[in-house]
């Protein structure tokens, strides 16, 4: 019985080893704030175009979801 179990367990575990070899620390990436755009023209005048209200709203929603995800990750760490 011991020999039978040991050979079959090795066969079953072998495909799972690759899953656990590549474990990485979980992290939540911080959203990137929209930056002002600088436009150069032919006559060397520089125009600065600020980001639109739409970009600002998208950034705000990304920040809100980032905060929720970070809290969830911290809760998981605390439960472990």
Image (tube, grey):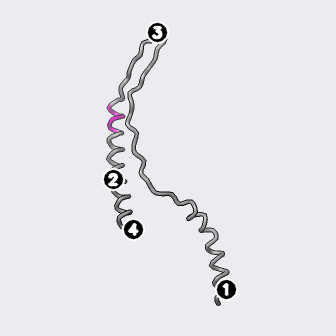
The stretch in magenta equals 53-57
Residue 27 pos. (x, y %): 43, 53
Residue 42 pos. (x, y %): 49, 11
Please name which of the two marks, 4 or 1, marks the residue nearer to the observer. Answer: 4
Instruction: Note whether 16 is above or below 43 in the view shown.
Output: below
Instruction: Note whether 15 is above or below 6 in the view shown.
Output: above
The answer to whether 6 appears left or right of 51 in the picture is: right
Tag 3 residue? 43
Tags 3 and 1 touching, CB below 8 Å: no
* Along the viewing direction, whichever of 25 and 68 lies nearer the viewer: 25
Residue density around tag 1, few if under 14, some if 14–19, many if 20 or more, within 10 Å = few
User: Marks 1 and 2, Cα distance to the nearest angstrom?
Assistant: 49 Å
Q: In percent of the image, x 42 and y 47: which residue is there?
A: 29
Instruction: Note whether 7 is above or below 19 in the view shown.
Output: below
Earlier in the chain: of badge 4 and badge 2, it is 2
Earlier in the chain: of badge 3 and badge 1, it is 1
Quarter containing the N terminus: bottom right
Q: In percent of the image, x 32 and y 41: which residue is there?
A: 60
Tag 4 residue? 80
User: Marks 4 and 3, Cα distance to the nearest angstrom?
Assistant: 61 Å
Earlier in the chain: of badge 3 and badge 2, it is 3
Tag 2 residue? 68
Residue 33 pos. (x, y %): 37, 37
Q: Which SS class for mark 1? A: helix
Count of numbered circles on the image: 4
Quarter containing the C terminus: bottom left
* Along the viewing direction, whichever of 68 and 44 lies nearer the viewer: 44
């Amino acid at each position: 019985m011991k020999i039978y179990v040991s050979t079959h367990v090795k066969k079953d575990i072998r495909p799972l080893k690759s899953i656990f070899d590549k474990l990485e620390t979980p992290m939540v990436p911080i959203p990137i704030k929209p930056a002002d755009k600088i436009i150069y023209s032919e006559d060397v005048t520089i125009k600065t175009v600020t980001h639109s209200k739409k970009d600002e709203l998208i950034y705000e929603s990304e920040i809100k979801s980032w905060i929720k995800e970070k809290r969830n990750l911290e809760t998981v760490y605390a439960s472990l």
